[in-house]
Image (cartoon, rainbow, N blue to C red):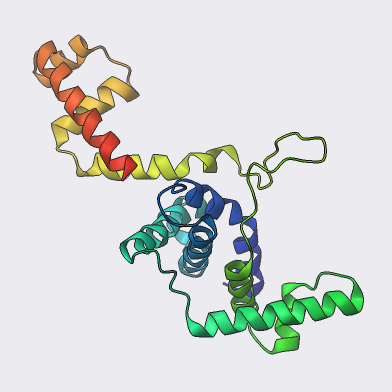
Amino acid sequence: MPEQEIRLRAEDNLGLVHHCANRFRGRGIEYDDLYSVGCIGLMKAVRAFDETRGVKFSTYAVPVILGEIKRLFRDGGAVKVSRTTKELSLRVVRERDKIRAQTGQEPTVRQLAELMDVSEADIAEAICVSRPPVSLTESNEEGESQLDIPVPAPDVEIGDILALRQILDTLEERDRLLIYYRYYKNCTQTNTAKLLGMTQVQVSRREKKLLLMMRGELLQ
């Protein structure tokens, strides 16, 4: 993918990073660290995405971003940004501030790349890592709460949807069908029991166990 497209796709999908990072608020790691490592996941997804697979970018990117954030927890909260990226991030910030002071304008990624003799993709990644997280609940001058990073409706819940699908894929076929009939086809427990060759009581008990298990998996 051309570096210009990499930059644009990363910038257009920063809302996904905020959405994913927000799922892990209050779990012992600062939000800015969650956001930074999420940006790393976003850049990995941008570079590895294959449009020929017929999958939306957001569908592909969210698990990659979540994977980086979960790895952060497994690593004890240490954000692993390479030294090269950290150094480039500092250089980008200094160069950007210099241009702002001289021209009063925000430099583009292309301008920074040309001035610093660095690829646009690397500049975009450095900016992602260095950029502070934007508040999703900041109030405006009139004291009204607003959403600073708009995310299309399908993307808002995509992380939970993908996580749920992953859990369903791990279930045995009968359990998966039970959930399918009950919550996708809106069948009653009695009708579900007939379809699966079970009793209504068995369906009720199994359903409760499955819901508890799935809830636990989603909250991990």
Q: Residue at x 27, y 20 (%)?
A: 182
Residue 22: percent from the left, percent from the top? 50, 47
Relative height, residue 44 to residue 112 (above, below): above
Residue 118: percent from the left, percent from the top? 65, 86
Relative height, residue 84 to residue 70 (above, below): below
Residue 123: percent from the left, percent from the top? 64, 77
From the viewer's perspective, tell me whether residue 39 is left or right of residue 93. left
Camera-side residue of 158 and 5: 158
Q: Residue at x 49, y 52 (%)?
A: 21
Relative height, residue 52 to residue 111 (above, below): above
Q: Quadrant of residue 140?
A: top right
| Image label count | 0
Quarter occupied by the N terminus: bottom right
Residue at the right extreme of this rendering: 103
Q: Residue at x 17, y 28 (%)?
A: 209
Q: Is residue 13 visible?
A: no
From the viewer's perspective, tell me whether residue 57 is left or right of residue 2. left
Residue 150: percent from the left, percent from the top? 65, 44
From the viewer's perspective, tell me whether residue 80 is left or right of residue 212. right
Residue at the front extreme of this rendering: 28
